[in-house]
Image (cartoon, helix red, strand yellow):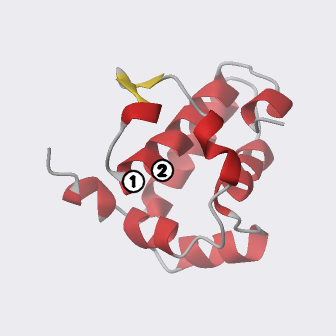
Amino acid sequence: MDNTRIFKMPFARVYPMYIQKAEKKGRTKNEVDTIIYWLTGYDAASLKMQIDRNTDFESFFAEAPQINPNVSKITGLVCGIRVENIEDRLMQQIRYLDKLVDELAKGKAMEKILRS
């Protein structure tokens, strides 16, 4: 499968969709941001910079300060595919983010989403 298209997609284009998905279910932008901070190590200023620069997913994850060491605890299905079995590292990181936002939208407690 050629993932080049999603890898080159600007994160800033998908970010509002993550927020919209969460807000439709009564969650907040701050919770989405907290998930992104936890997963990538970005803070508010560095996340804003990535969005303002229109950084693609490939660069967004490559430039992440630190991918959380607990990502291996993220398991389950996204688009019918088990995230823990995805071989391409970048695609797996993108799907980890999708999975965490899905869990937020489904009403899961933040402590569980952040694998605390």
Q: Is residue 40 visible?
A: yes
Q: How far apart in space, not on screen, are marks 2 and 1 (Cα)?
A: 6 Å
On the image, the x and y values in percent for residue 101 come to 61, 36
| Residue bearing the label numbered 1 | 89
Left or right: residue 100 versus residue 82 is right
Q: Residue shown at 39%/53% (left/top)?
A: 89
Give, as a three-letter code, the residue at label 1. Arg
The quarter of the rendered structure image containing the N terminus is top left
Q: Nearer the viewer, residue 45 or 89?
A: 89
Give, as a three-letter code, the residue at label 2. Gln
Q: Nearer the viewer, residue 24 or 84?
A: 84
Q: Secondary structure at mark 1?
A: helix
Q: Taking 100 as reference, is 106 above or below it?
A: above
Q: Nearer the viewer, residue 6 or 83?
A: 83
Q: Residue shown at 66%/67% (left/top)?
A: 66
Circle count: 2
On the image, the x and y values in percent for residue 52 come to 56, 77
Label 1 crowd (10 A; few <14 / some 14-19 / many >=20): few
**Marks 2 and 1 close (CB-CB < 8 Å):** yes
On the image, the x and y values in percent for residue 68 come to 68, 55
| Residue bearing the label numbered 2 | 93
The quarter of the rendered structure image containing the C terminus is top right
Label 2 crowd (10 A; few <14 / some 14-19 / many >=20): many
Q: Residue shown at 36%/25% (left/top)?
A: 79
